[in-house]
Amino acid sequence: MPERYRSNRRRDADGALDGPEPGTRVTAALAGVRRPSDVLLVHDAVLPNGLSFRVQVPEAHDLFGDRGGDGLPDDALLLRSVVEQCAYATLQSTGLLRPGEVPLNTSSSSRVLTDPPLPLLPGGLLATCLVQELRTSRTGRTRRVVASCVLRSPDGRTVADGETDAGVLENVLYRNWRGAGVVRAGHLPPVPNTPYAHVARVRSRPDNQVLSQVEREEASGAHAVLRLSGPHPYLLPASADHVTGRLFAEATRQLIIGVWAPNGGMRSLHLSFPRLCTLATPVLVQAITCAGPKVPAQWHVLFSQRGVTVCAGHVEAGV
């Protein structure tokens, strides 16, 4: 049975939970990103077992909402980023993620629950993030945590939700586990830009295009190779020593939208990460359509490295 999460957050003299002032932007470090321009959240309120935030998408961002310059701020990739930042900020604020610890995602999901387009995402959505501690090792050096996020419109309607599940390791334990000689994104050699082949453009900037050798397979799916062409400030920071969930999510989005849903967007995205994916060898991705006349536009997505599955996903798109 899951254990009830216990907050390590301090309380003020009146017994209220201590937290940031409402209306202040979440810092980049608290959101788990490198650049302040990538932060999607503004503090709203402190809750007994979490936090709430206002979602605020940066204007003219080169990744969020970009779709060949036309803008598409209503798909599940952006929602996954909201959920991830909510979870990271909440876990740190409540003390479940402490300095010197490394969170490794085991699964994540995001889905839109309303008819498109998602309303008021650029500034009117309230994101409520609740966290729960699942299990702590006897030594206390590893833990399992889950954070769930619900997005509501100003009138209180639930318009989207998501969840992230992670294992938390002490930094020393993580370094010992990974060992020496680990390749980091900052040391990846650059490779020439490889243009898309027979697929729609889904990103306006070449450095945001994360796939190469894209091929459509008649009526069954598509496949491609993940482009590991050096660090990316959001998808693959220079300090990263493995393929991030963000990069997997973006690759999934580009394959599905670029090949199968050029006029639509991802309505739901679920990813699981059964194995750490290194940066040293190529990563293959395959999308397989879900068969059946009553099945909506859905795909299974598999990422493999050296023949082993490192990420598995399920996508539903609006076409």
Image (cartoon, helix red, strand yellow):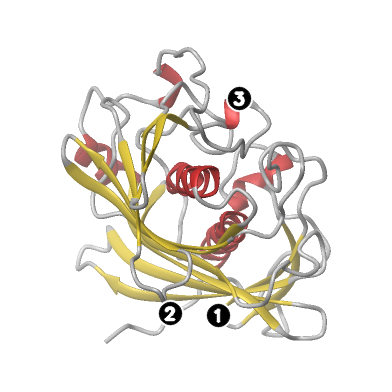
On screen, residue 190 above or below 21 = above
Give the residue type that dot 3 points to: Pro
Mark 1 touches mark 2? (CB < 8 Å): yes
Residue shown at 78% from the left, 70% from the top: 119
Q: Quarter-wise, where is residue 19 in the image?
A: bottom right
Query: Label 1 sits on what residue type?
Result: Asn
Picture coordinates of residue 221, whole percent (x, y): 36, 49
Crowd rating for badge 2 (residues with CA inside 10 Å; few <14, some 14–19, many 20+):
some
Disc 2 designates what residue?
A: 5
**What is the distance, in whole Å, between disc 3 and disc 2 at their CAs?**
43 Å
Looking at the picture, how far across and down is residue 56, in whole percent?
77, 58
In primary-sequence order, the first of circles 3 and 2 is 2
Give the quarter of the image for residue 33. top right
- 31 above or below 240? below
Instruction: Name the residue type under label 2.
Output: Tyr
Packing grade of label 3 (10 A; few <14, some 14-19, many >=20) is few
Image height of 82 relative to 192, above or below? below
In the picture of the structure, the residue carrying the numbered disc 1 is 49
Q: What residue is pinned by disc 3?
A: 206
CA distance for labels 1 and 2: 7 Å
The CA distance from mark 3 to mark 1 is 41 Å
> In the drawing, does residue 134 fall left or right of residue 37?
left
Image coordinates for residue 17, horizontal then vertical, percent: 65, 77
